[in-house]
C-alpha cells in the first residue's frame, strides 16, 4: 500500500491535478 508521501514522490503532478481540478496537466493531456 502506498501512502500520500509515496505518491507525491512518484508523481508530484498528482498534487497539482488534485489541487487544481480546473487545470489539466500536460502529461494527462
Image (spheres, rainbow, N blue to C red):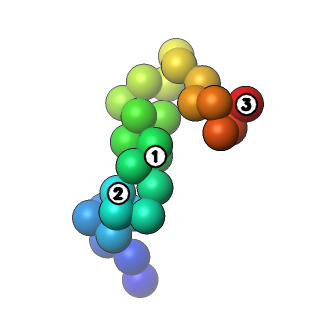
Give the vertical position of 27 relative to 29 (above or below). Answer: below
Q: Nearest the camera: 20 or 10?
A: 10
Give the vertical position of 18 relative to 4 (above or below). Answer: above
Sequence order check, earlier mark of 2 and 1: 2
- Residue at figure coordinates x 41%, y 83% from the top left: 1
From the image, tell me which residue sits under label 1: 14
Q: Residue 22 at what x, y percent from top left? A: 52, 16
Q: Is residue 15 left or right of residue 17?
A: left
How many residues crowd around disc 1 within 10 Å: few (fewer than 14), some, or many (20 or more)?
some
Taking the image as drawn, is residue 18 in sight? no
Secondary structure beneath dot 2 equals helix
How many residues crowd around disc 2 within 10 Å: few (fewer than 14), some, or many (20 or more)?
few
**Is there CB contact under 8 Å for labels 2 and 1?**
yes
Which numbered marker is on residue 8?
2
In the image as oriented, which residue stretches furthest toward the right?
29
How far apart are the two marked residues, 1 and 3, measured between alpha carbons?
14 Å
Amino acid at each position: 500500500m502506498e501512502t500520500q508521501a509515496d505518491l507525491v514522490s512518484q508523481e508530484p503532478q498528482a498534487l497539482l491535478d488534485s489541487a487544481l481540478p480546473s487545470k489539466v496537466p500536460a502529461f494527462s493531456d
